Amino acid sequence: MLCYALSFVDRQILSLLVGPIKHDLRINDTRIGVLQGLAFAVFYTLAGLPIGRLVDTYGRRTPIAVGIFLWSLMTAATSAARSFWSLFLARIGVGVGEATLSPAAFSLIADYFPEEQLGLAISVYTMGIFIGSGIALAVGGAVVDMVVRLPEMHLPVLGTLAAWRLSFLLVGLPGILAGLLIFTVREPERRNLLRDAEGRAARLSVADVISQLRGRWQSFTGLAVAMIFQSLASYAFLSWAPAFFQRLHGWTAGQAGRALGFSVLVFGCLGMYVGGALCDRWQHAGVHEAPLKVSLLSAAGACVFLGVAMILPSARLTLLLIAPGLFFQAMPIGSAYAAVQLIFPNQVRGQVSAFFMFILNLGGISLGPLLPGVFNDYLFRNERMLGPSISLTIVLASLAMLAILPPTCRYYRRDYQRMHASGGEC
């Protein structure tokens, strides 16, 4: 969870620097959306697929540690970017590094906890999204306020740097030390293994993994596509909310960061905890499709509260509605990842998790930060219409979730029952 939080600090800091980056690199909102989304997402998702295979075949600790070192170095290297394309390449490096974490983490957690606690356990891990984003917004906002007032600096090797670039150095370099923490985590014994005719754990080829996916394609695809839209709405908000308060209400990065950081940290984590606990409670009561039910509740709440919050003229009212909106938005994240673990055998969980994230992030991280920028530049054609651009993105994404999840429930229930028909061993 601490490592996941760290990864989101490195991702989120860019959202506080939209103004200085646009001015320094002379780019528009659409390109800012590309830097926050597509540049990171494409290689984050593609790198996850071979890493998932590595996790299932060999081990889980070392890939995580190597990834932390890589993404921390590339975040620090962002400070040296002199153009849109050099910043784009640095964001690719951050994405490749962060691709190592979640496929390995989901596999580890699924072996550490019994199934009736898995929704809450993975929700605690994925609280890192809101802990990291909240810290980045609150602390990062204060740092940005401090460094943007400084004159240009002359550093060894890096040369002359605009003051805003120092923010990337300050959040990137400490992560190198955090990678060492992973070596305090032990590798648990693998459970829920697919076994051969002689009762031994089977070694599965890529074709076998594809076969496992094909047998559950309806539930897997429905869940993955629904979570594309959940992710899209989350990243649209997190990527553009700081700029919204700066443009529309004249706040500094520090003021926006502190206000949003508190809401993201408190209500995001609370929503994730409640969503995971509710999923486990329903699962214990025999509602096998509980993760999908949590996602439906989330979509309805986020659509109402966040959709309305971003079009209100009052900053105070916007913040008031953002709190319950973030609570609902966060609810299904941990339980959705747990849902994937619950219908697949151990030997494919890393690869299936990587593929799940490939689908989810390629759509969610790419389009979430991009769409508000596109709506702003090409639909509303007005920088001050950022609120309606964010709101439109969130509402459309939430309605798509509400359409996709109900027909997916019966397929998921079938696959869950089939997976557990023999006491959890496949």
Image (spheres, rainbow, N blue to C red):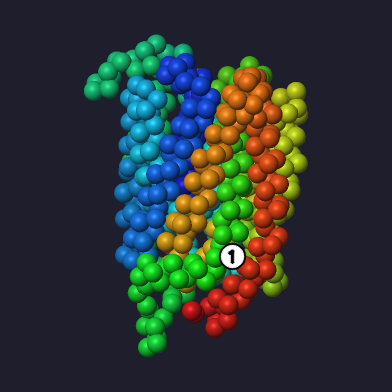
Amino acid of disc 1: Gln
226 on left or right of 402:
left
Residue shown at 44% from the left, 67% from the top: 210
User: In this figure, which residue is indicated by the disc labeled 1?
Assistant: 218
Q: Is residue 241 above or below residue 412?
A: above
- Whether residue 85 is visible, yes or no, is yes
- Residue at (61% x, 47% y) in the render: 229
In the image, residue 162 lies at what x, y percent? 38, 16
Q: Residue furthest left?
A: 157
| Quadrant of res 292 | bottom right
- Mark 1 is surrounded, within 10 Å at the Cα level, by few (under 14), some (14 to 19) or many (20 or more) other residues, namely some
Q: In the rendered view, would you say 107 is above or below 69? A: below
What residue do we see at 62% from left, 44% from top? 268
- Drawn side of residue 226 relative to residue 110, left or right: right
In terms of secondary structure, where does tag 1 sit? helix
Query: How far across and how far down the image is residue 60, in percent?
Result: 36, 60
The answer to which quarter of the image holds residue 411 is: bottom right
Residue furthest bottom as drawn: 198
Judge from the rendering whether residue 323 lies leftward or rightward of residue 237; answer left or right. right
Where residue 259 appears, as percent x and y from the top left, is: 63, 29
* Residue 185 visible to the viewer: no
Q: Position of residue 334 (x, y in %)?
A: 57, 55
Q: Nearer the viewer, residue 258 or 235?
A: 235
Question: Which residue occupies the foreground of this view, 26 or 316?
Answer: 26
Q: Is residue 298 above or below residue 353?
A: above
Q: Residue at x 58, y 29 (%)?
A: 374
